[in-house]
Image (cartoon, rainbow, N blue to C red):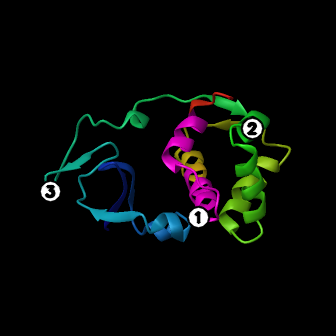
Amino acid sequence: MSKFARLVNNVAVDVIDGDPAEYFHHDIAAQFEEVPNNVEAGWVFANDQWSAGESNNSAETEVFQTVGVIKFKLLFTSPERVKAKELRASDALIDDFWSILDDPRTTEVDLNLPSIQNAIEYTLTAINAAGIAIDVGERKAAILSAHLF
């Protein structure tokens, strides 16, 4: 079975055995590439080879907060929230994520979960593509900081 990784700044942040399309929405699955079977999350690809060890990606070691749903939504700017609501009608992945947030049984959001981080990045990327000019990486980091501005 083949192993695949999603890379951020040449660091394997998500590593799976098997076809990424079986685990992720096609837009996220397309970000994966095949890697050697020994590669693990946190490994760095540099000079055409993989190695375990430290990288400059602070998101690997940073621990994020768990926040309430209302605070989580407020971490997005008003224009971002409005555009995300608009995109729900045409983007099943955004609608799924925000529907989970809207469920009254959902009381908190763990910003450490890769699925939450991926959903934040996906939503911000879609918002940017839909005409709200933002720096996706910067906005994702600001949301993960859980600091209301």
**Disc 1 crowd, CA 10 A, few/some/many (<14, 14-19, 20+):** few
Question: Which secondary structure lies at badge 2?
Answer: helix
Reading the chain from its start, which is encountered first: label 1 or label 3? Answer: 3
In the picture of the structure, the residue carrying the numbered disc 3 is 48
Alpha carbons under labels 1 and 3: distance apart: 32 Å
Q: Say if the magenta span includes residue 138.
A: yes
Q: Which residues are magenta?
A: 121-144
> Is the residue under label 2 in contact with that under label 3 (CB below 8 Å)?
no
In-image side of 77 versus 142 (left or right): right
The one nearer the camera, 112 or 124, is 124
Dot in front, 1 or 3:
1
Q: Say if the magenta span includes residue 60.
A: no
Alpha carbons under labels 3 and 2: distance apart: 42 Å
**Disc 3 crowd, CA 10 A, few/some/many (<14, 14-19, 20+):** few
Dot in front, 3 or 2:
2
Q: Is residue 100 above or below residue 73?
A: below
In the picture of the structure, the residue carrying the numbered disc 1 is 129
Q: Is residue 135 above or below residue 83?
A: above
Reading the chain from its start, which is encountered first: label 3 or label 2? Answer: 3
Q: Quadrant of the C terminus?
A: top right
Identify the main secondary structure in magenta: helix
In the picture of the structure, the residue carrying the numbered disc 2 is 74
Alpha carbons under labels 2 and 1: distance apart: 21 Å
At which x and y percent is residue 147?
A: 64, 27
